[in-house]
């Protein structure tokens, strides 16, 4: 069959007092069973909003899906009957957020929260639910699970809390997990451990995983492919290897150059100049043009389509050939 999740032409707007913020402007991405897609971008690029629209947890109002499709297993979540949609989003898909502390209930023990999934969705007894909670905690390698199952979220460290969130997410063995900055709030060493755990569970259960992050450094080892977002659009879509070897969009290139590298200790970190655009006033033409080091007049007027770089890659840059380093095609430039 086709992809597990196939987002097509998704559009989301926020109606604010100051006007319409175009948060998502025609996003296409897909993920197969057992595959990891990293969605990369600065804050405000639309990566979280896209995920919220997929999961049906968009704040609406003010946010509205104004176009596109969200195909799960071939069926459009946006138009299917509400009851079926609830069942899919409740059990076959799960989401992990950055801030575990505010996603967990502070007055319920971790075990009760984990067990609740089974009580609600599987009709388990209290005892069965407790046993399952312990099993899940062991699965995400929380030490002393039998004792800790009675503890409350504030008694866990940030990393352990994030493991609880992961346990919660995998509890019903979903086919798809969307993790929104799952390690951003953690220390660097803990980040790597949590990311490793997520990748391991993803392989074990053959889940599709969408990993939303602003940090290109954390996804290199776990992602199969990367979608780079800017101003509510995907600007580059490529297998992870290709992105690191030869990015085909100046924005991706900038993100790559701003990853801290061990071999460049002491040298100044590169930063893309300027700020992401205000979504109420997205620049005309290529939205990245005010920040792009190679922008030319055409960039201010013509919105770049997603050009096919090869069968597996697309880039929304008029000058992708030059960016990817293919000088042969210099004559084809617009
Ligand atoms: Fe830069 Fe122009 Fe490419 Fe946009 S289309 S990324 S402004 S070169
Ligand atoms: Mg976000």
Image (tube, rainbow, N blue to C red):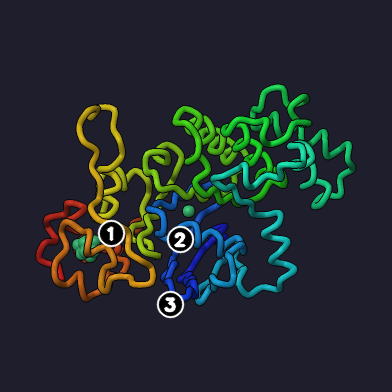
Choose the circle earlier in sequence order: 2 or 3. Answer: 3
Measured Cα–Cα span from mark 1 to mark 3: 36 Å
Rate crowding at label 1 as few (under 14), some (14 to 19) or many (20 or more) other CA atoms within 10 Å: some
The disc label shown at residue 309, or none:
1
Choose the circle earlier in sequence order: 2 or 1. Answer: 2
Measured Cα–Cα span from mark 2 to mark 1: 16 Å
- Give x and y (percent) for residue 141: 64, 27
- Give x and y (percent) for residue 204: 61, 37
Residue, x 45% and y 57% (percent of image)?
47
Which is more toward the observer, 195 or 222?
195
Which is more toward the observer, 227 or 11?
11
Quadrant location of residue 101? top right
- Left or right of residue 276, residue 325 in this image: left
Q: Which residue corresponds to mark 3?
A: 19
Against 316, residue 186 (above or below) is above
The disc label shown at residue 29, or none:
2
Q: Quadrant of the C terminus?
A: bottom left
Residue, x 27% and y 54% (percent of image)?
251
- Mark 2 or 1, which is nearer the eye? 2
Task: Tell me which image quadrant ligand 1 sits in.
Answer: bottom left
Circle 3 SS class: strand
């Amino acid at each position: 069959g086709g992809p597990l999740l196939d987002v097509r032409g998704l559009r989301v707007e926020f109606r604010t007092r100051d006007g319409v913020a175009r948060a998502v402007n025609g996003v296409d991405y897909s993920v197969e069973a057992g595959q990891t897609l990293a969605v990369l971008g600065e804050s405000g690029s639309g990566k979280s909003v896209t995920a919220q629209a997929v999961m049906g947890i968009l704040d609406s109002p003010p946010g509205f899906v104004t176009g596109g499709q969200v195909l799960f297993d071939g069926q459009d979540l946006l138009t299917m009957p509400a009851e079926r949609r609830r069942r899919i989003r409740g059990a076959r898909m799960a989401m992990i957020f950055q801030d575990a502390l505010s996603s967990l209930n502070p007055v319920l023990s971790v075990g009760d929260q984990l067990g609740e999934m089974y009580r609600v969705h599987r009709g388990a007894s209290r005892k069965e639910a407790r046993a399952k909670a312990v099993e899940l905690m062991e699965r995400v390698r929380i030490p002393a699970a039998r004792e800790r199952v009675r503890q409350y979220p504030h008694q866990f460290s940030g990393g352990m809390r994030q493991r609880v969130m992961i346990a919660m997410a995998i509890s019903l063995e979903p086919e798809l997990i969307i993790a929104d900055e799952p390690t951003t709030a953690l220390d660097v060493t803990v980040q790597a451990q949590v990311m490793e755990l997520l990748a391991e569970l993803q392989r074990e259960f053959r889940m599709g995983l969408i990993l939303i992050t602003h940090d290109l450094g954390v996804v290199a080892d776990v992602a199969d492919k990367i979608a780079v977002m800017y101003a509510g659009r995907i600007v580059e879509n490529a297998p992870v290897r290709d992105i690191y070897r030869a990015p085909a969009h100046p924005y991706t290139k900038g993100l790559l150059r701003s990853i801290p590298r061990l071999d460049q200790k002491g040298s100044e970190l590169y930063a893309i100049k300027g700020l992401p655009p205000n979504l109420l006033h997205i620049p005309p033409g290529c939205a990245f043009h005010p920040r792009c080091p190679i922008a030319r007049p055409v960039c201010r007027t013509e919105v770049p389509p997603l050009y096919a770089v090869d069968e597996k890659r697309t880039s929304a840059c008029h000058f992708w050939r030059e960016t990817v380093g293919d000088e042969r095609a210099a004559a084809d430039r617009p």
